[in-house]
Amino acid sequence: MNVLKKAPEGLYKTGFALSGGGIKGLCHAGVLKALEEKGIFPDIISGVSAGAVVGALYADGYSPDEIARLFEDISFRKMTKIRIPEGGLFRIDAFEDFMYKNLRAKTFEELRIPLRIVATDLDKGRSVVFDKGNLIDPIVASCSVPLLFTPKRINGVHYVDGGVLKNFPVSTIRDSCRTVIGINASPLVADEYKLSLLNVASRTYHFMFKANILADKELCDLLIEPVDMGNYDTFDVEKGREIYELGYKSASDILQELSNASQKLLTD
């Protein structure tokens, strides 16, 4: 937990920043549930990769429990199709269809809560923030892990996972919010792993993404970072419910600590 000084005045009262993390991003939904129970809701959301998916569904009006149920029976293989390599090992079409089917809003403007999605411009090597127009394409782009998925083409530009350059999108809303709550689903834990294509790729990207979140962590007024998330792999799709519950418990414990600390200050 990291509580910093009050943020500068901005357009929005409270912003939520949701990191990437594959299936581990389901912990975001658990954290959102805990925050709701304390009466804390976002006026704007920023998301990368898995955080973009959860953020979009939440901004579209889905409850945290509904988001968890959506992914409960979805496996990585069902969401992708093996293909002959042409920029990526898997197709992301099934995931794109899933988002079209389940998101009621098809544009940013139709969402109930303002949303910013971060993707990486592969052609120019820069981080790009989407917040207007078509909603589905930026979500798919933000989730397109290099090598595993074919880059997403938007208006003639190839985009890949936003986490390549910015896996924790706090800075994208920092200047627009008085308070930013950051949820990081990808804490660094160098545990044992199996030598498989997916595990090695996941571990490599995990280390890379960890390096680019440090500055953004310091920008949070409240950082919620479930350390036990390091015990899960990016593609542990069968453990979605566990991950959701872990996010909920971790956030509940942190919020209770803050409540106890506030009460103690008032009584001292």
Image (cartoon, rainbow, N blue to C red):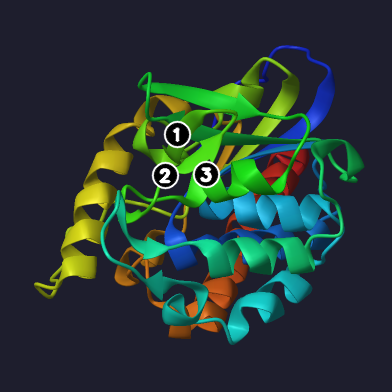
- Asked if marks 3 and 1 touch (Cβ < 8 Å), the reply is no
Question: In the rendered structure, which amino acid carries the disc numbered 2?
Answer: Pro
Question: Residue extending furthest left?
Answer: 195
Picture layout, residue 207 above or below residue 149: above
| Image point (75%, 58%), residue name | 57
- Asked if marks 2 and 3 touch (Cβ < 8 Å), the reply is yes
Residue that label 2 marks = 151
Q: Nearer the viewer, residue 32 or 53?
A: 53
| Image point (77%, 56%), residue name | 58
Question: In the rendered structure, which amino acid carries the disc numbered 3?
Answer: Ala
Which quadrant holds residue 83? bottom left
On screen, residue 163 versus residue 97, left or right, reads left
Label 1: state its secondary structure: strand
Question: In the rendered structure, which amino acid carries the disc numbered 1?
Answer: His
Label 3: state its secondary structure: helix
| Image point (47%, 49%), residue name | 20
Q: At which x and y percent is residue 154?
A: 57, 34
- Asked if marks 1 and 2 touch (Cβ < 8 Å), the reply is yes
Give the label on residue 141, or none. Answer: 3
- Find the distance from the CA under tag 1 to the CA under tag 2: 6 Å
- Find the distance from the CA under tag 2 to the CA under tag 3: 7 Å
Residue 157 visible, this angle: yes
Picture layout, residue 10 above or below residue 262: above
